[in-house]
Image: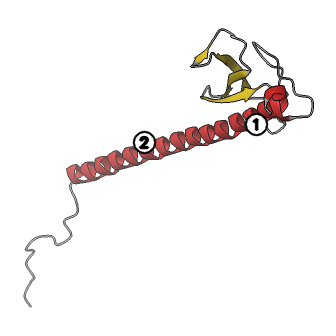
Amino acid sequence: MRRARNCGNPDRGETLIEVILAVAIIAITAVALMGSVLTSITSSGEHRTLAANDVYVKSYADAAQQQIQRQANPIYAKCATTYAVTKPSGIPASWTVGITSIKYWSGSAWSTSCSGDPAQLITVAVTSPTQLSTSLSFAVRDPNRLT
């Protein structure tokens, strides 16, 4: 019988360098994917907070406008520097909300000094626990002079 000659090993396998390169490529890909996932999570949370800020500032502005001008006994005051507006119950205690400024109509522009005109531009702002702020301005008039 003839002996088979060994012409080379058909199960060569991979070298250590090939294995290290493959592991390095997988690690780089994993780091890139984790970075993109973390960025997505962070931006999603920020957008959720901004959306909540928008809802809360509009809710507070509506409540303020209702209490200052539209209810049966409005709290409107000529040349007011602030108003004691009751915060709507839907705004969490961890959010800060309030009136930040009041300007007065001078006949041609909004001014910080009261000229006696019954129109006021009220700016309200809300700040989330993560310190993201949103503001909204609305105008009110003396309810006794609306007719």
Q: Mark 2: few, some, or many residues within 10 Å (few <14, many ≥20)?
A: few
- Of the pair 126 and 131, the residue shown nearer to us: 126
Q: CA distance from mark 2 to mark 1?
A: 41 Å
Depth-wise, is mark 2 or mark 1 nearer the camera?
Answer: 1
Q: Earlier in the sequence, mark 2 or mark 1?
A: 2
View extreme (top): residue: 113
SS at mark 1?
Answer: helix
**Vertical arrangement, residue 117 with respect to residue 6, above or below:** above
Q: Is residue 36 left or right of residue 138?
A: left
The structure's colour scheme is: secondary structure
Amino acid type of disc 1?
Asp
Q: Mark 1: few, some, or many residues within 10 Å (few <14, many ≥20)?
A: some
Q: Is residue 115 left or right of residue 27?
A: right
**In the rendering, which numbered label is found on residue 147?**
none
- Of the pair 109 and 137, the residue shown nearer to us: 109
Residue 62 place in picture, x, y as percent = 76, 36
Residue pointed to by mark 2? 35
View extreme (bottom): residue: 1
Q: In the rendered image, which quarter contains the N terminus?
A: bottom left
Residue 116 place in picture, x, y as percent = 73, 13
Residue 55 place in picture, x, y as percent = 69, 41
Question: Residue at point 80% right, 19% down?
Answer: 83
Amino acid type of disc 2?
Gly
Q: In the rendered image, which quarter contains the C terminus?
A: top right
Residue 137 place in picture, x, y as percent = 64, 28
Question: Residue at point 92% right, 34% down?
Answer: 72
Question: Residue at point 74% right, 20% down?
Answer: 118
- Of the pair 124 and 115, the residue shown nearer to us: 115
Residue pointed to by mark 1? 62
Task: Classify residue 111 by image quadrant.
Answer: top right
SS at mark 2?
Answer: helix
View extreme (right): residue: 73
